[in-house]
Amino acid sequence: MYKQLSNHTFSNVLGSPDWESIKASIYEKTARDVERAINKTERNLEDFKALISPAAAPFLEDMARQSHLLTQKRFGKTIQMYIPMYLSNECQNICTYCGFSLDVPIKRKTLSDQEILEEVKVIKSYGYDHILLVTGEANKTVGVEYFLNAIKLIKPYFSHIAIEVQPLDQEEYEQLIAAGVNTVLVYQETYHDANYKKHHPKGKKSNFTYRLETHDRLGLAGIHKMGLGVLIGLEDWRTDSFMCASHLAYLEKKYWQSKYSISFPRLRPCSGGVELKSVMSDRELVQLICAYRLWNGEVELSLSTRESERFRDNVIKLGITSMSADSKTDPGGYANPNVNLEQFEIDDKRSTAHILEVIRNQGYEPVFKDWDGVLQ
């Protein structure tokens, strides 16, 4: 059993929300509500509801224009570059949508020290200085001791280390931060408790509350930056996104020393396979990105290679602040491609050099350092 946090966590603040009432309040927003939100300079969560509502669709051009200006004002004409490195596809959870799920019959692989360094060599040849370490959720085989060792190996090569692994206890995060972790990404997947349990029937990840309180543990541990997001497609994307925004608002107020990022993973094909409950169009994803920016001028907005070349090229100027490229989602995929099964299929398979050219052709500068080293 994990150690229970105090009552002052987002889980306690959230309580048992009336999901259908929240959903209805979003879908009932009118064009007048949207106009009011667009014309404000300071926007609240009710304005965010309006900006993600169906009523905002005709205002997308205005939203995009403002999003562009606000992003450029805060982050300049730069796009931060990062790359994921998958350390392991071992996992103890069953998740209906994931290629690493325990019930998916794939060859399991965890990188050795030598294999980690081989991956680092290839990644460094692309120019990256910001790395994201990713694993399945397997505490026994890929736990804190493994992470500490991996961080020790790669720390000499990267100025910024981010991780996307299983949720951990506060004390474990404190160890990883001391070892050199700068950022931790944890996605709730969906904030709908009942639907969450449907998609996570077995393993530690089935504990909705423990996952929901992860960012509180990160804040108490003193993390530099934490990332949030929902897996778009598991539940109504507008309602889930509003819940995620509410979570961010709570965290920014309570753990104001930390920085924050939002990611927009849309479900992609994988070995697990799952029927989408909510299909989001490209235009709707642009709407969500712009809504986040109009509501919050400080949060970093990240887009991965899950998205298509055309889409990623077109949103560079609309609010996105960081992008990945050349991504491999299988352990050892950089040094030894096409050996292990990927977690999900990527869409934008262009090289880093190609992506850099695209960014520069749009008048932006790709950045390989973390924001703190660039803008302060």
Image (spheres, helix red, strand yellow):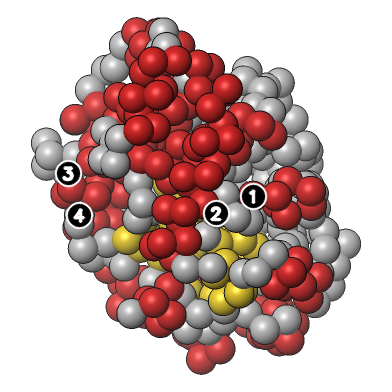
Instruction: Please identify, in this view, whether the residue under mark 1 or under mark 4 is nearer the observer.
Output: 1
Circles 3 and 1 in contact, beta carbons < 8 Å: no
Amino acid residing under circle 1: Val
- Above or below residue 241? Residue 50 is above
Which mark is first along the chain, 4 or 3? 3
Which mark's residue is nearer the viewer, 3 or 1? 1
Q: Which mark is residue 255?
A: 4
Q: Residue extending furthest bottom?
A: 156
- Who is closer to the viewer here, 83 or 149? 83
Position of the C terminus, as image quadrant, is: bottom left
Q: How far apart are marks 4 and 2 (CA)?
A: 23 Å
**Residue 150, image x and y in percent?**
53, 77
**Amino acid type indicated by mark 4:** Tyr
Label 4 Cα neighbours within 10 Å, binned few <14 / some 14-19 / many ≥20: some
**In the image, what residue occupies the spot 36% across and 11% down?**
25
Q: Position of residue 173 (x, y in %)?
A: 32, 64
Classify mark 3: helix, strand or loop: loop
Give the Cα separation between the discs numbered 2 and 1.
Answer: 7 Å
Q: Residue 320 carries which label?
A: 2
> Is residue 90 visible from the viewing direction of this image?
no
Q: At x 70% / y 72%, what residue is drawn?
A: 360
Of all residues shown, which one is farthest toward the right? 338
The residue carrying mark 3 is 5
Q: What residue appears at the point 57 percent right and 23 percent down from the top-left corner? A: 57
Left or right, residue 98 beside residue 241:
right
Whether residue 129 is visible here, answered yes or no, is yes
Closer to us: 127 or 205: 127
Mark 2 Cα shell of 10 Å, populated few (<14), some (14-19), many (≥20) = many
Left or right of 262? Residue 33 is: left
Task: Say if 194 sits above or below 309 in the image.
Answer: above
Q: What residue type is labelled 3?
A: Leu
Residue 66 in the image, given as x and y percentages of width and height? 46, 45
